[in-house]
Amino acid sequence: MRSPCCLPPVVALRIVTALLISISCELSPRSAWGQPSRGMYFTAPFGEGGTWNLYELSGGAASSNPRYAPSHTPAWNGAGWQDARLDAESRVERLSGKQVRGHLVAIESAAENEAVQTRAGRGGPYWIGLSDDEAYGGGESASVPPNPTLDGLKGLHGESGDGVGWKWSNGDSFGFANWAEGQPSGEDDFDYVGVYSQKTNAGQWFDSPGDVAQRWITEYDTEMPYDFLVDQQPRHVPGPSGGWGTWGVREVTGVGSVLGLNGTLEQLLEIPSGTKVVDYQTSVLDYSDYESRPTHAPIEVDRRFETPGAQDHLAMVAHSTIRIPEGQGGNWRFRVTSDDAAELWIKNRSFHSVSGWETVVSPYGSMAIELNRSMATSEGIIELPPGDYEVELIYNEFAGYAALEVSASGPGSQEFALIGDPGAAIQGATPYVLEQFHVRQVRRTGEGTGQPQTIGDLAEARLLLDSPGPLDEVLSSTDRQIFFEYGAKEVGWFKNIQDVPAKLDGGAFALSAEGVLRVETAGEYTFGFHTGSGAALSIDGVKFAGVGGVGQLFDDGHTLLVDQAGRTSLAVASAWLEAGDYPLELITYNDAREAGLIELLVSPGAMTSMPARGAFRLLTDVSQAVDHVRPAGLQLIGQALPGDADEDGKVDLTDFGILKLHFGTGSSRAEGDFNSDGTVDLSDFGILKSNFGTAAAAVPEPTSAGLFVAGLVLLVATAAVRRSRTLCR
């Protein structure tokens, strides 16, 4: 290889310009080469004459992006220098078409050193191909007396010299170094060179014994005249397609450890036998199993993962199509809040800047969060003209807590909305409890009885309330509202409220709260609760119609119930209530965990499909006003239905009106030409008629059927008149 600084000025300028263009069209201050890109191929113009070579980081979660090729990393914990050299020299790239054999990277300029360091990231030090071991052509430089004018000698910090002692494993001449302070150390057997990746000394070199396990960089001297990696077509991950207003989601569990984005891609591209696969549709991607808080993005419309139980070692893919409306094209901002790795890929487009922990722009333009991380938010900017765009979202949960939220903000807007969120506007006043709740609490002590000091389920909680033991603690009180947290704080939706009842602070206990609900205005209302273990809510004479969160309806819809939750859970249900008074009962318990939550909630209107904190109030002894507006997110588009002229996901009278308006004159699908023959005629009307009611009703209503008969007569008459006019010309 040749360093750009050794080239004629005009050629060097062209190389630097090409490098800057290849990095990004618009770079954020943090991302001259993107954020750390462990496990991905990348290219850079440091080949002969400024041509493009290929690089690959190995010894991490995966050696190469599985969208391009299967991983072949020998070990997660890296390798010694000799093993890394053998591995690099055994690899043959297949991306340039040349099938070039690799070698440990030979870094020959400051620009190349910076490029490699920023792509390697802070995942630990990594080997490069430099050595003064005589077995690899070196000269045991550390044995030579220090001389600051010569490269490779103790005390030298990056000055260029004649390279006495140090050799690159691929045979390239040594002419550049970037030693850290006090390096090389000159100690015996410290014959091999690694590169630091910590923030304070990232990119600086050090010598080391060869048996230390580290990552390594493989370089392929492809010497292509352009950045050929952009031509590679990454593989799509299989999974269900989204529909009108929905994401198609696949969850895969039972795959063992899922390490980072590349490990997740491998599991999803080649699903191992013995794994569990769950496919479903959901309107938004907003998940959380945090007991301490929901996802910290401000939208907080959290749902659970579909796979039961803990989400450790989960791999997920979601597909849909987003629509950028006319007049709203431009720079869109997308946010992904995740714990752990994730990737947002808008196909055939490329993010031009990203920010966030462990976040990069991939070679094919996605916003990629490549390593497992604690919950954090990444943001990317991408230019999207009006139109429809396929989207693929990859996510993994390694272990511990899990969270995922995907949102977007349009040009000039500072407000983010969940992608696919239809939005909500809830206004009104809440019902309230006459006087106060009558609360009975029983804490199980079990002392001296041989009874376990836990409560297993709601049935056991009811039994404890009805028949407490002689040593169990019993407390009765009246309270304005039912709210308390114990152990981990800030679990629920309401903060800075004194716990009621204040007596409870953990342990195994059961609680019943009874009151009379006053409804002053007939209408639809939503009731619910947060619970850490389990709860059941019933209102005399009320049958719930809709249910949301993790709640289930029992007793023919008269009871909203969650049992053996195992973690903080939200359950909601809606019902129509006439004005009047309704006896109400809540039963809940704690299964002896050290932390938990109980909140009894109410909202005017129906808020079961996407319950949001802003629409709810604690159910208390006063009516409370609610004025909640949640903006709609980007619309999710499904496959166009035959007869759906306005592409709103249903074939209805609006589509009939469009066809009628353009009958005999239109020539596009938007005008009613459903068979694409260039005219809107009776055959198109037949397509609309046969699909009328699709996605809206099983069969057309009688009124709609009558309108169709009238419409058919009208269309036939219109066609006859137009043919008559044509014959008379």
Image (cartoon, rainbow, N blue to C red):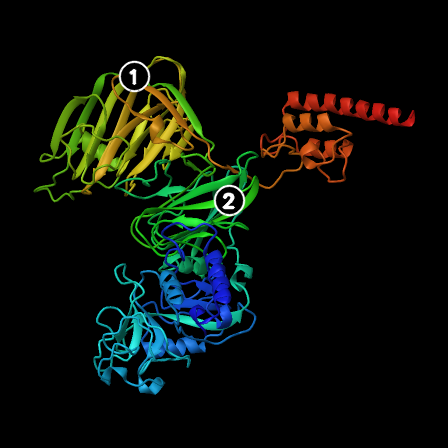
**Mark with earlier residue (1, 2):** 2
Could you tell whether 365 is left or right of 695 in the image? left
Q: What element carries label 2?
A: strand
Q: Is residue 223 above or below residue 115?
A: below
Query: Toward the viewer: 5 or 256?
Result: 5
Where residue 498 appears, as percent x and y from the top left, is 17, 28
Q: Which residue is drawn at 30% across and 71% down?
A: 158
Could you tell whether 701 is left or right of 283 in the image? right
Q: In which quarter of the image is the N terminus?
A: bottom left
Determine if residue 251 is in view: no
Residues packed near mark 2 inside 10 Å, few (<14), some (14 to 19) or many (20 plus) = some
Q: What element carries label 1?
A: loop
Q: In this view, does 453 lie above or below 38?
A: above
Where residue 537 appears, as percent x and y from the top left, is 31, 28
Numbered disc total: 2
Hey, what amino acid is under mark 2?
Glu
Hey, what amino acid is under mark 1?
Ser
- Give the labeled residue for mark 1: 623
Marks 2 and 1: in contact by CB < 8 Å?
no
Q: Which residue is drawn at 56% across and 60% down?
A: 231
Where residue 455 appears, as percent x and y from the top left, is 21, 40
Residues packed near mark 1 inside 10 Å, few (<14), some (14 to 19) or many (20 plus) = some
Q: Is residue 364 above or below residue 515?
A: below
Q: Quadrant of the C terminus?
A: top right
Real-space Cα separation, disc 1 to disc 2, in angstroms: 47 Å
Tag of residue 383: 2
